[in-house]
């Protein structure tokens, strides 16, 4: 498969210049030269074939060709409401969630999160996750770059917007209980919000407030690691609703 590059605002038939980061990836990492056939996508669902026509120091220049068909998007628009994890674990969650097909990711800070909103902003973590999302989109063949929403406190996400169906993953054995994935409706809702907690799990208060507007679900009898939960849950949801 030809190398793929992210370029917002593509005009068919035009000459376009890759960003500095994408240009370096093309020439220094992939060692592509003039005449190399590549593909470009705009992050909003459009993808085109292209040919490198110049590799000047200011940036790689491409001649945009006809439209191509990117990987199909899921029928269900899933927003992953993910409690921020420590270290680089959140990078892995973003990368794999994008690969599996999420439409958006909403990072949240919970009672047991080990990082604050101030620290996230100071560390430019959202910008980092956006770069991870773009890289994962390039790798998996999608042409839509999922939105990474600004990190927010959990209480702002403990409600279900009109028209959305919220699933909250909880640990097995919680007093509040929780059904299995197979207890979810057989007919897939068009818009889903999947909530996944931090390393220490949700507090009882968070589960109680979440249960007011969400369907509580467990993923079997074993307690999964926080950085694995989102990927397992997404896979299970897509399987349940036959959107794989």
Image: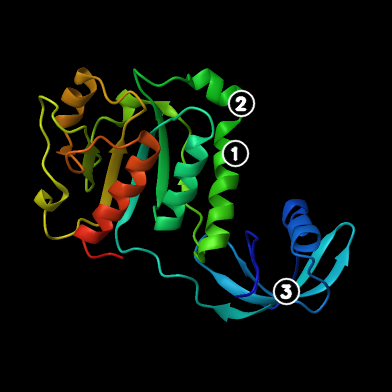
Residue at the disc numbered 1: 128
Q: Secondary structure beneath disc 2? A: loop
Residues under numbered marks 2 and 1 in contact, where contact means CB atoms less than 8 Å apart: yes
199 up-or-down from 140: above or below: above
The residue that appears at 21% across and 32% down in the rendered structure is 171
* Residue found farthest to the bottom: 66
Q: Percent x, y for residue 211? A: 15, 31
Observer-nearest residue: 90 or 66? 90
Query: Residue 10: which numbered mark, if any?
Result: none
Instruction: Answer yes or no: is residue 43 visible.
Output: no
The residue that appears at 48% across and 33% down in the rendered structure is 150
Residues under numbered marks 2 and 3 in contact, where contact means CB atoms less than 8 Å apart: no
Residue count near mark 1 (Cα–Cα under 10 Å), binned few <14, some 14–19, many ≥20: few
Residue at the disc numbered 2: 123
Residue at the disc numbered 3: 14
The residue that appears at 48% across and 27% down in the rendered structure is 86
Q: Percent x, y for residue 165? A: 21, 46
Q: Percent x, y for residue 61? A: 80, 67
Closer to the eye: label 3 or 1? 1
Q: Is residue 134 left or right of residue 38?
A: left
Mark 2–mark 1 distance (CA, rounded to whole Å): 9 Å
39 up-or-down from 238: above or below: below
Q: Percent x, y for residue 164? A: 23, 47
* Residue found farthest to the right: 57
In terms of sequence position, does the residue under pointer 3 or pointer 1 come before the other?
3
The residue that appears at 25% across and 53% down in the rendered structure is 236
Observer-nearest residue: 98 or 162? 98
Residue count near mark 3 (Cα–Cα under 10 Å), binned few <14, some 14–19, many ≥20: few
Number of marks = 3
């Amino acid at each position: 498969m030809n190398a793929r590059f992210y370029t917002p605002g593509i005009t068919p038939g035009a000459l376009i210049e890759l960003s500095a980061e994408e240009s370096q990836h093309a020439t220094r990492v992939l060692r592509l030269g003039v005449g190399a056939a590549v593909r470009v996508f705009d992050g909003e669902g459009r993808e085109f074939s292209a040919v490198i026509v110049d590799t000047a120091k200011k940036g790689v220049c491409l001649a945009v060709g006809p439209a191509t068909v990117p990987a199909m998007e899921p029928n269900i628009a899933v927003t992953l409401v993910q409690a921020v994890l420590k270290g680089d674990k959140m990078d892995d969650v973003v990368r794999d969630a994008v690969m599996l097909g999420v439409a958006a990711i909403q990072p949240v800070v919970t009672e047991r999160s080990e990082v604050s909103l101030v620290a996230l902003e100071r560390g430019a973590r959202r910008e980092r996750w956006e770069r991870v999302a773009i890289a994962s989109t390039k790798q998996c063949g999608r042409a839509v770059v999922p939105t990474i929403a600004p990190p927010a406190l959990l209480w702002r996400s403990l409600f279900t917007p009109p028209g959305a169906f919220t699933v909250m993953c909880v640990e097995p054995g919680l007093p509040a209980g929780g059904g299995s994935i197979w207890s979810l409706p057989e007919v897939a809702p068009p818009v889903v919000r999947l909530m996944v907690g931090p390393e220490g799990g949700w507090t009882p208060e968070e589960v109680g407030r979440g249960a007011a507007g969400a369907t509580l679900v467990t993923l079997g009898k074993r307690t999964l690691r926080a950085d694995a939960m989102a990927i397992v849950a997404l896979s299970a949801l897509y399987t349940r609703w036959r959107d794989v």
